[in-house]
Image (cartoon, rainbow, N blue to C red):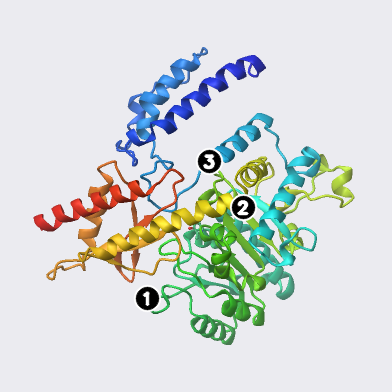
Amino acid sequence: MPMDAEQLRDHAHKMVDFIADYYKTIQTFPVLSQVQPGYLGKLLPDSAPNYPDSLQNVLNDVQEKILPGVTHWQSPNYFAYFPSNSSIAGFLGEMLSAGLNIVGFSWITSPAATELETIVLDWLAKALQLPDDFYSSGQGGGVIQGTASEAVLVVLVAARDKILRRVGRSALPKLVMYASDQTHSALQKACQIAGLNPELCRLLKTDSSTNYALSPDVLSEAISSDIAGGLVPFFLCATVGTTSSTAIDPLPALGKIAKTNKLWFHVDAAYAGSACVCPEYRHCIDGVEEADSFNMNAHKWFLTNFDCSVLWVKDRSSLIQSLSTNPEFLKNKASQGNMVIDYKDWQIPLGRRFRSLKLWMVLRLYGLEGLRSHIRNHIEMAAYFEELVGQDTRFKVIAPRTFSLVCFRLLPLLNSEDHGNKLNSDLLDSVNSTGNAFITHTVLSGEYVLRFAVGAPLTERKHVDMAWQILQDKATALLESS
Ligand code: PLP
């Protein structure tokens, strides 16, 4: 029997024990997996088993063969990319969702899945003090997407179709999209999928003079010149908390320009949106009032296990016009009577998971105050790391820190030919090869920069201290050998 309740109880208890032990011993694993490409093919058979195996044998294989190839995102020594939080509440929500295993594309397929999603996203909109237009009680509402990439794609497609309805479909090759050169590459992918002219996807240049934020003047000039050239500006994406350096685009000024020029204004706050539930960070999204859509990844910094990307729109009908289909086999009275939300029409796939359960459990089991202290704790540790870097004259903080990411680099020796790019890349490799810390990099103004992102739920100050010690020791070794 694939689903016998007593066998489930027995096996699931064993699995929970396995996972709890994993978390207890997580620091004993190298945080960045040290395996070589193709390692697993050498360890597993080349065809599926014909007959059932025991759970214990599978768990033994997980321990011996799979875990060495895992990069431990939940390790307290993880400081790479932007962390992706797990929590007990998020985990339990995932478990419940897997247990119920519904496919909630239309309201009728599980009314609770649709209605809980709507309610929880209204709660979160309130916690973020989003404008009323984003609430489900008006023309807008929230929807959980898998990732920020899907979120930006669906709003881009909605915006594209909206403008084409106004100016005619033949204008597609003339549509112009604007964002800064710091915008996540997810937008570029969305433009490719949406069939936009790649030459008209304008990633406007930023530099250190604006701390890598998009300049409203640069945007205005680009729009004027495009209009003069007979093109059709239609979409602006601003970011609050860019991936490279957590730059904050000036939403109020950009929103004004978007409004004047009738652009769809999307705000990507995939990482930093979570911080805006803290009153002292809410100002970072001031200006969201002018946005048509707003996105944050609860799976990044909001204790909600991957995946859970939250998107709000002011005008849900735009999404629905672009994404809805209504085949006979899905028709039902509630949908036909326009009495309900069918989230299948707000997203790319038809099928959808019961993701709101985990967000609901996170909000209930930690409360907004619990989430705020989680965020503040990380920001304090990042500020502490920034201080440590500032005290060692061999290093320099490269961009101002606002949230929990510190961008810094080891200063090159005077005779360096490449401004220290190789030195910093070597430093990164040598830190990561220890297995005791994992950091990643970016490039700002042509310089290779190290990123230290605090955000794993288990990280404490002692882990920050240890990572800094490793960085200092490896820097000393590199400088001595160069
Ligand atoms: N936008 C920003 C600002 C990000 O930092 C990221 C990922 O780090 C994304 C978008 C893409 O996120 P996802 O993996 O959810 O598509």
Residue 97: image location, x then y, percent: 65, 35
**Which residue is more in the foreground, 245 or 229?**
245
User: In percent of the image, x 25 and y 64: which residue is there?
Assistant: 391
When the figure is inspected, residue 349 is found, relative to residue 294, above or below; the finding is above
If the image is split into quadrants, where does the C terminus sit?
bottom left
What's the distance in space between the residues labelled 1 and 2, CA to CA?
Answer: 35 Å
Mark 2 vs mark 3, CA separation in Å: 15 Å
Q: Would you name the residue on which mark 2 appears?
A: 368
Q: Residue at x 45, y 49 (%)?
A: 83
* Side of 366 where 79 appears, left or right: left
Q: Nearer the viewer, mark 1 or mark 3?
A: 3
The answer to whether residue 332 is above or below residue 390 is: above
Which residue is tagged 3?
87
The amino acid at mark 3 is Ser
**Residue 77 can be seen in this image:** yes
In this view, 302 is above or below 231: above
| Residues marked 2 and 3 touching at CB (< 8 Å) | no
Q: Circle 1 is placed at which residue position?
A: 208
Q: Where is residue 310, by image quadrant? A: bottom right
